Image (cartoon, rainbow, N blue to C red):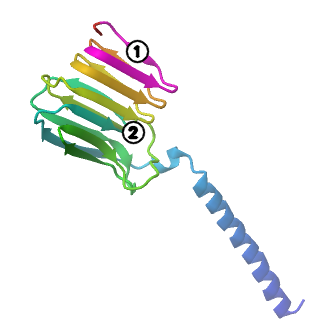
Amino acid sequence: MDKRKTIILGSIVLGVILLTVALILIFNAGNKSPEWSFKNMVEFYDDLSNEFKNPEWLEIKGVVENVNVFIGEDNSLKAILYGQIPANYNNVPELRIKNRNKKYFLEVYYRKDQIDLQKGSLQLDLYIPEDYQGWFSIDTYSGSVQLAAGKNSDITVNSVSGDITAEKMECNNFVAQSGSGDIRCEKHIR
């Protein structure tokens, strides 16, 4: 075989090898298990506080975060988002709150449409003043919601796949809906 044919054959073989490696990398990148991207974790913490001024309505939206509601801390609405995220994660969430006509909207906001954190990576602790008697709702996709020892007029909790737990709640109307999660309500719901 002459030198030219050897170079051409070697180039073809090298091209096939590089193409195969590229296809394997592309395939694995699309089917990467969450554990791969969660090896190097760092602590995450974000909080906000907002004075309530005669609120009538409080709406909380989350995605994969477990939500714990604590009632009776002080006169401000306080939210703390914490947990662990990958060190190189580029879709870090932030807490946002809006106040429109005595209606408060609190959201765990992600910059990108795709949220690829695992369920339970982050927790949202929500502190609501004890004297708040208005309506509030919590909506989450896969996060679980836990409420305890509160007195409110109307509470609505929606989750697509997270569990909902309510203990020692006193309210006129309590609605809990979960597509595939468990719902547990203990006594004192009037």
* 125 relative position to 8: left or right: left
**Is residue 47 a member of the stretch shown in magenta?**
no
- Give the Cα distance between marks 1 and 2: 23 Å
Q: Earlier in the sequence, mark 1 or mark 2?
A: 2
Cβ–Cβ under 8 Å for marks 1 and 2: no
Residue at image mark 2: 121
| Badge 1: residue crowd in 10 Å (few <14, some 14–19, many ≥20) | few
| Badge 2: residue crowd in 10 Å (few <14, some 14–19, many ≥20) | some
Total marks in image: 2
Q: Residue at x 37, y 20 (%)?
A: 175
Where residue 88 sits in the image (x, y, percent)? 39, 56
Where residue 49 sits in the image (x, y, percent)? 15, 40
Which span is picked out in magenta?
170-187
Q: Which residue is drawn at 51% across and 27% down?
A: 179
Residue at image mark 1: 184
The amino acid beneath tag 2 is Ser
- Is 124 or 61 nearer to us in this picture? 61
